[in-house]
Image: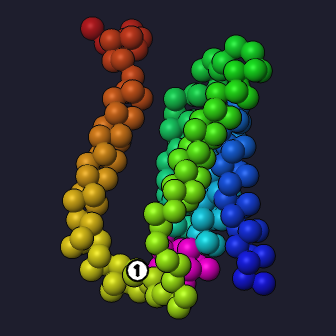
Amino acid sequence: MHEVLFYLFAAMTLLPAVMLVCSRNTVNAAMLMIVSFVGTAALFAMLQAYLLSVLQIMVYAGAVVVLFLFIIMLLDAGRIKSFKGRIKQIIVPLAFFVALSILPVLAILSGRGGEAQVGEAVAPASSAEQFGLLLFTKYQLPFELTGFLLLAAMVGVIFISRRNVSALPKSEGKE
């Protein structure tokens, strides 16, 4: 049963992700991203990393996708022109998928993974205390860099969405 659930949640993660890359509508792509994030959260729950599962739903499927939808509506992405021709819309995402799929397969086939562990391992971030300890000790630099990247993205969105003040019509009643 455990194996069937794994394949179900893996398909629930991968299929919407591939459809997201091939989607022409940005709002549909954001909805497909939510489904993919929920599948990832279910895989975390199967690994008994319940905190990461809940954080995946709250942060990514909740806040990040809402932010993406806000940016899509703010920038009016519907008027952005897409690729010319249907062939490019299929070949380009497929080429990226194949390129990203070859590397893990080569790593698995290399045989450098070592012996498989027989016992059931406990997830290192299965509780909030362990997660916080790992996040603010071993992974402190990547955590802070991610914060700076999100700050830079937010400043970029504000800069792009800013209206040109000189282009606005002046009120005729003021002199």
Q: Secondary structure at mark 1?
A: loop
Along the viewing direction, whichever of 116 and 61 lies nearer the viewer? 116
Where does residue 89 sit, x and y in percent of width and height? 71, 26
Q: Quadrant of residue 11?
A: bottom right
Place residue 81 in its image quadrant. top right
Per the image, is 156 magenta?
no
| Quarter of the C terminus within the rendering | top left
Q: In the visual, does 108 lie left or right of 22?
A: left
**Magenta span: chief secondary structure:** helix
Position of residue 70 relative to residue 89, above or below, is below
Q: Is residue 167 above or below residue 91?
A: above
What residue is rendered at 49% in x and 48% in y?
67
Would you place residue 92 above or below residue 16 in this image?
Answer: above
Q: Position of residue 26 (x, y in %)?
A: 64, 36
| Residue located at (66% from left, 49% from top) | 17
Identify residue type, mark 1.
Ala
Residue 70, given in percent of the width and then of the height, sits at 53, 43
Q: Nearer the viewer, residue 78 or 52?
A: 52
- Residue bearing the label numbered 1: 125
Look at the image and tell me whether residue 31 can be seen: no
When asked about the image quadrant of residue 143, the answer is bottom left
**Can see residue 53?**
yes
Which segment is the magenta one? 44-55
